[in-house]
Image (spheres, helix red, strand yellow):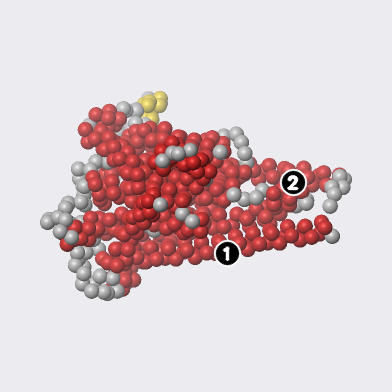
Amino acid sequence: MKPSGNAGDADAATDSAGLATRGRTLGILIPTIWLLLFFAIPFLFVVKISLSEAAYSVPPVSDLLVWQDGWPVLQATWANFALVLTDSLYVQALYGALRIALIATALTLLIGYPMAYGIARAEPGMRSLLLLLVILPFWTSFLIRVYAWSTLLQDQGMINNALIWLGIVEEPVRMLNTEFAVLLGIVYSYLPFMILPLYATLERLDGTLLEASADLGARPFTTFWRVTLPLSLPGVAAGCLLVFIPAAGEFVIPELLGGPDTLMIGKILWQEFFNNRDWPVASALATILLLLLIGPILLLDRTQSKAESA
Amino acid sequence: MRRGSFLALGLWAGFAFLYLPIIVLIVYSFNASRLVAVWGGWSVKWYGELLRDPQILGAASMSLQIAAISATVAVIIGGLAGYALSRFGRFRGRTGFSAMLTAPLVMPEVITGLSLLMLFVAMESLTGWPDGRGMTTVIIAHITFAAAYVAVVVRSRVAGLDMALEEAAMDLGARPLTVLRRITLPMLTPGLLSGWLLAFTLSLDDLVIASFVTGPGATTLPMLIFSKVRLGVSPDINALATLIVLVVAAGVLLSGWILLRAERRHARQVRAAFRREGAMGEG
């Protein structure tokens, strides 16, 4: 069919182009409005509440703007931030969360890298099955999997029973309600988030580079250290960020597996909000955590955009 | 060779780590004893107890409704966003758009939950909507984070699609809506379906965000499980967990099989169409 080039066709063409442009605009506009309204703008309200005072009212905060003699007066206070940044409980919880998230990320990388590498080097037919095995636990309830660990780690739990039966220990080892349990829970829950981006970069790795390196006499370890690892760094970065950022604000894992001395900011924030009903302090904690994580979040977005354009 | 077996060992140890708790959970759901440490013989009594508990059934029905509605809306919003990111090239505000879709994936849930609640409270005092909190506010919250996950799924699907088919249809004079209906949407269906499933399971699983934005009378299943688990081990939770794990695993495997079949059929059709085209060109 050849374009006949008469006036009707031209009209239809501009009509189509207009429709396509309108569709495009709509495709961008609808998600933008939704995310602005229900994801971005809500942070402003958290900041607002963090500058208010707790009050016995519904909602339990003072008004930021009060009318005095017909004039609006701003009654903002830095007291919540001052409290959060000086009181040792909050400071330790912030520090504890970042420290635990960092250690857990390193451990997840150590376990996830060999797994991702193993999958990427498996027979092509096996790869999708192995990947499915990695993703499947992620589809089943996170809460339930964390709870399963709490029963396994108990003093009377299966792990302690097995250790005693094997004669490795005499008395049950206290594992539940320790930092070890929290680290284990984070590594376990976030492992798929580490493996998937690692696999994506390792799978695309050019096999001829590895052969060339071997042909030139490099030992397997040298090849790994000088070729494979540097080439997989984008996957390492994405995986680490995908684990670190949510782990730093984790609530369920320290609540179910950690003890009272495992201080993490997500748990403290929850307690301030639900147990103490202190909305301003909870909001100040959320604001500080958000400020700490905004850099890593933007970095993650950057690595993903880069991975796509590559 | 030695490295190969080392890798295989690491891989299988990793899988054992991933599946051990789930398997133990399933086995112990059939334990007749109330105590975790004691094996009291096989029994299905916890399943019976589960199905007679009106609280659990109510929460499950509430969670399923929330998950179905929020997954459906999230597929529309996330699908548009994923398509835009992968096909619209550079547009104004793209950086911010992409960041707003990445951030919900990793944002700690306590922050997302708290900030949405603050929004709902402020909106209610300004406009009177939402009138109290409950199912509607939970649905809105779930749509928001699930849409970001759907966008990731759809984005990677669209990137792997052949644009030539759409262009060919346009060249042959098909209108944009026809192209969308006849070419783009059918090609996207597998991606949208897996996006919907992911959104559904994420909503079904969410404890933290729902706890912040819910109100009296809207207790979801994770909230109920959490309150029971905090009081100590309750064997009926093992049974409930087993049911959830089995249903989800069956759903994922089934949908994976359906998608694979649809993809193969589609590939066959495209090949057949190109063969016909080739034959016509020669003739």
- Find disc 2 in the rendering and name its residue: A16
Q: CA distance from mark 2 to mark 1?
A: 34 Å
Q: Quadrant of residue B240?
A: bottom left
Q: Nearer the viewer, mark 2 or mark 1?
A: 1
Q: Which element carries disc 1, helix, strand or loop?
A: helix
- Residue at image position (74%, 46%) is A16
Find residue B239 and report its image quarter.
bottom left
**In this image, B264 relative to A273: left or right?**
right
Along the line of sight, which residue is nearer the eye, B282 or A297?
B282
Do labels 2 and 1 touch, CB within 8 Å?
no
The relative height of residue B261 versus residue A259 in the rendered view (above or below) is: below
Residue type indicated by callout 1: Arg
Given residues A1 and A116, the one toward you in this image is: A116
Total labels: the figure holds: 2
Where in the figure is residue B2, as x and y percent of width and height? Answer: 37, 51
Q: Residue furthest left?
A: A170
Compared with B72, B58 (above or below) is below
Residue visible at 64% across and 43% down in the picture: A24
- Is residue B239 found left or right of A159 in the rendered image? right
Q: Which mark is residue B210?
A: none
The type of residue carrying mark 2 is: Ser
Image position, residue B249 (x, y; %): 42, 63
Q: Is residue B70 above or below residue A266?
A: below
Q: Which residue is mark 1?
A: B261
